[in-house]
Image (tube, rainbow, N blue to C red):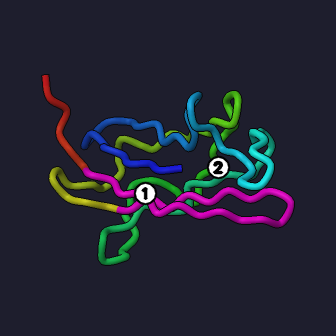
Amino acid sequence: MAARLAWFVGNTMIVQLGTVAEPLTDEITAAVITDATVSLVAVRTRAGVAVTGDTFPKSMTHTAGGIYRATVSNLLGVTEGTSYVAEITATKSGNVATWQVPVLATDREE
């Protein structure tokens, strides 16, 4: 499941794992997973420094059909034009999957 995010500086943002076309699934059975524990663990700079301005880890709520979401504060200390990494984990029945998602902080255009 590939993901890439663009965060608008100074805006509350939604982080989502899974889509209608590509939900969180069991890789062996292809069954959609609706009862995993999913977390946005941290947002870090490319150098691995934790970004401040919100509390992590942040639980991601299952919304429907293998899609999980969390809200990130508009106070997150990101700088326009800078790349970050959002770490997301999903756990079910002792199995863990981790994503290191590239994030680009950008200014919202009119």
Q: Quadrant of residue 18?
A: top right
How dense is the environment of label 2, judged by Cα within 10 Å: few (below 14), some, or many (20 and up)?
some
Distance CA(mark 2)–CA(mark 1): 16 Å
Disc 2 and disc 1 in contact, CB within 8 angstroms: no
Q: Is residue 109 left or right of residue 30?
A: left
- Name the spot of residue 15 as percent of width and height, x first: 48, 42
Rendering coords of residue 67 (x, y %): 63, 35
The picture quadrant where one finds residue 40 is bottom right
**Vertically, is 11 above or below 24?**
above
Q: What amino acid is at disc 2? A: Ser
Query: SS of the residue at dot 2?
Result: strand
Give left or right: position of 107 versus 33. left
Q: Is residue 101 magenta?
A: yes
Q: Which residue is mark 1?
A: 101
Amino acid type, callout 1: Val
The residue labelled by disc 2 is 59
Instruction: Identify which residue, 3 or 47, lies in the foreground.
Output: 3
**Horizontal placement of 6 versus 28: left or right?**
left
SS of the residue at dot 1?
A: strand
Residue drawn where x is 58% and y is 37% of the image? 22
Tag shown at residue 91: none
Residue 45 belongs to magenta span: no
**Is 23 rendered above or below residue 49?**
above
Q: Residue at x 38, y 48 (%)?
A: 4
Span colored in magenta: 85-104
Structural crowding at the residue carrying mark 1, measured as other residues with C-alpha within 10 Å and reported as few (<14), some (14–19) or many (≥20)? some
Task: Identify the residue at image location x=36%, y=46%.
Answer: 5
Q: Indicate left or right for 30 with 21 as reference.
A: right
Query: Could you tell me residue 80's position as x and y percent?
Result: 17, 50
